[in-house]
Image (cartoon, rainbow, N blue to C red):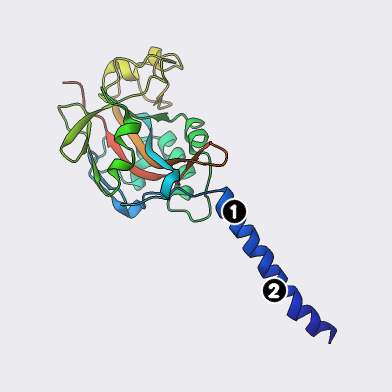
């Protein structure tokens, strides 16, 4: 009888506590829906199409943010799948291995993606002459983003019929990217005197690359959903998705 008493009453109590904790967790930690990795079609080393889901988690959603980091390489890769990341850059490969467990994760939720990416040297992507937070707001839910890194033109992002030129970050004036803010392979982007926190802090060097080696420059871009916790008024984030690793066009 004692064993039966414990079985009948303890189990429902445990279930009730679990339900209460789950309910509190959902209320205290609202979720921002990620873009499934399967919604992103990567082509060669120069194009990617991101299909944005047509909904997100209600009033908490604010916009999407894109984190990027530039990598110096001596390897020319026509198709930039994860299998060639080590050949492109050991830093790129290490970054992706750290980020990969978060992609499409159902357990690594509600992490501060701002700290996670910026602590690894990533910066926020910007747009020339446009505020990217406004462009990537709820107005693009259900739309497609098309990223294009052509051989003789500045890289762009297209939403509908509108084409935006991609811009490197300057950290809101905290540093001065060289030679400019375009995603173009130029000697001033990868020269050793510019690889510092005051100039090109968005660029990861390639240790051991020869002084006479040809430089190929790549950029990895990840997209996350951003919202506002209406209880704490702090930013909350979805898990990330990889847009692509693009090869920057040479200066023409």
x and y percentages locating residue 32 in the rendered image: 45, 47
Residue 25 tag number: 1
Q: Are marks 2 and 1 in contact (CB under 8 Å)?
A: no
Q: What residue do we see at 35% from left, 52% from top?
A: 55
Q: From the viewer's perspective, tell me whether residue 113 is left or right of residue 137.
A: right
Residue 86: in sight, yes or no?
A: no
Q: Secondary structure at mark 2?
A: helix
Q: CA distance from mark 2 to mark 1?
A: 20 Å
- Judging depth in this view, the residue of 155 and 245 nearest the camera is 155
Residue 12 tag number: 2
x and y percentages locating residue 165 in the rendered image: 23, 27
x and y percentages locating residue 181 in the rendered image: 30, 20
Q: From the viewer's perspective, tell me whether residue 216 is left or right of residue 95.
A: left
Vertical placement of residue 210 versus 220, above or below: above
Q: From the viewer's perspective, tell me whether residue 19 is left or right of residue 137.
A: right
Q: What residue do we see at 39% from left, 50% from top?
A: 56
Residue 234: in sight, yes or no?
A: yes
């Amino acid at each position: 009888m004692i064993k039966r008493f414990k079985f009948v009453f303890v189990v429902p109590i445990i279930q009730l506590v679990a339900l209460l904790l789950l309910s509190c967790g959902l209320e205290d930690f609202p979720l921002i829906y990620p873009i499934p990795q399967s919604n992103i079609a990567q082509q060669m080393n120069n194009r990617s199409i991101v299909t944005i889901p047509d909904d997100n988690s209600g009033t908490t959603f604010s916009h999407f943010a894109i984190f990027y980091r530039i990598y110096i390489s001596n390897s020319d890769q026509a198709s930039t799948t994860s299998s060639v990341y080590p050949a492109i850059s050991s830093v790129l490969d290490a970054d992706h291995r750290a980020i990969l467990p978060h992609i499409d994760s159902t357990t690594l939720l509600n992490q501060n993606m701002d700290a996670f990416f910026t602590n690894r040297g990533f910066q926020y992507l910007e747009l020339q002459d446009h505020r990217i937070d406004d462009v990537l707001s709820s107005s693009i839910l259900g739309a497609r983003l098309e990223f294009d890194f052509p051989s003789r033109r500045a890289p762009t992002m297209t939403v509908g019929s509108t084409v935006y030129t991609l811009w490197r970050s300057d950290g809101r004036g905290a540093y001065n990217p060289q030679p400019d803010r375009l995603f173009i392979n130029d000697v001033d982007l990868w020269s050793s005197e510019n690889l510092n926190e005051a100039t090109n802090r968005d660029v990861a060097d390639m240790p051991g690359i020869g002084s006479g080696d040809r430089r190929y420059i790549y950029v990895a871009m990840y997209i996350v959903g951003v919202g506002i916790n209406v209880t704490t008024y702090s930013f909350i984030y979805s898990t990330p998705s990889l847009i692509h690793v693009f090869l920057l066009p040479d200066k023409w």
